[in-house]
Image: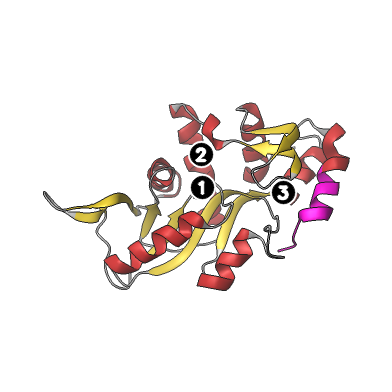
């Protein structure tokens, strides 16, 4: 069976110790049967493959934009490698830029490094995961201060599809409701559960707990 890019990405996460199963106490206090640690990506080959998955997600969702924006710091290498993959694999030559933590007042100056944003420019924000939407809330005012850009969307690696502590909405749903920014994920928790059921990855012993956790904290979207 030929795997889809989503299924390939799930295998990739497991093989690199980014997606693991067991019993984990999350920052929220919830006990989850799975854990996602994107800090385990650390090699050039991993980064190259990550770029391919982000680019595939952009193409699959037919997103059109001028520039990829990587919020400092985790988004910087992701935006760069996604731009490389778009060029190499799809012949789409897209700009990229990233923000500084502080405005530079000498040299070329400014808040963004790379493409200098212009009014009317369409941008896609590239991030690793979304827990609370903090990264989006921090980058949006910086983007709007730089130019009147249009946010074509935001790409993340995994959508946990999990409601917040004080909301019945997930972080992805909340940022869409608050800012009108649509968030696209390479995969979501339903994809991961399906991958276990199909035997694409190991973990059938955790299926019942995965489904229980989804029933308790999950959202549909």
Residue at position x 52%, y 54% in the image: 155
On the image, the x and y values in percent for residue 63 come to 49, 62
Where disc 1 sits, the SS reads helix
Please state if 68 lies on the left or on the right of 31 as rendered.
left
The residue lying at 64 percent from left, 49 percent from top is 187
> How many tags in the picture?
3
Quadrant where the image shows the C terminus: bottom right
Residue highlighted by disc 1: 54
Q: Is residue 97 left or right of residue 140?
A: left
Q: Alpha carbon of mark 3 to alpha carbon of mark 1: how far?
A: 17 Å
Instruction: Decide whether residue 211 is among the magenta residues.
Output: yes
Mark 3, other Cα within 10 Å: few <14 / some 14–19 / many ≥20: some
- Disc on res. 189: 3
Q: Are marks 1 and 2 in contact (CB under 8 Å)?
A: yes
Q: Tell me how far mark 1 sits from mark 2, CA to CA.
A: 6 Å
* N-term mark: 2 or 3: 2
**Label of residue 221 in the image:** none
Res 2 visible: no
Chain part drawn in magenta: 210-221
Q: Nearer the viewer, mark 3 or mark 1?
A: 3
Q: Nearer the viewer, residue 53 or 77?
A: 77
Residue drawn at x 80%, y 32% is: 203
């Amino acid at each position: 069976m030929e795997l889809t890019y989503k299924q390939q990405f799930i295998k990739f996460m497991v093989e690199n110790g980014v997606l693991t199963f067991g019993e984990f106490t999350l920052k929220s206090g919830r006990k989850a049967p799975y854990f996602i640690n994107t800090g385990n990506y650390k090699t050039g080959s991993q980064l190259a493959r990550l770029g391919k998955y982000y680019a595939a997600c952009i193409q699959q969702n037919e997103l059109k934009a001028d520039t990829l924006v990587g919020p400092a710091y985790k988004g910087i290498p992701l935006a760069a490698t996604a731009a490389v993959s778009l060029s190499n694999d799809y012949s789409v030559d897209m700009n990229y830029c990233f923000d500084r933590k502080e405005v530079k007042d000498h040299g070329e100056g400014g808040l963004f490094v790379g493409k200098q944003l212009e009014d009317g420019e369409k941008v896609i924000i590239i991030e690793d995961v979304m827990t609370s939407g903090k990264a989006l809330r921090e980058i949006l005012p910086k983007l709007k201060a730089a130019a009147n850009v249009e946010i074509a969307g935001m790409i993340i690696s995994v959508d946990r599809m999990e409601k917040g502590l004080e909301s019945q909405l997930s972080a992805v749903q909340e940022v869409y409701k608050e800012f009108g920014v649509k968030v696209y994920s390479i995969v979501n928790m339903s994809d991961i559960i399906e991958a276990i059921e199909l035997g694409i990855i190991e973990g059938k012993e955790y299926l019942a707990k995965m489904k229980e956790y989804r029933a308790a904290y999950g959202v549909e979207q």
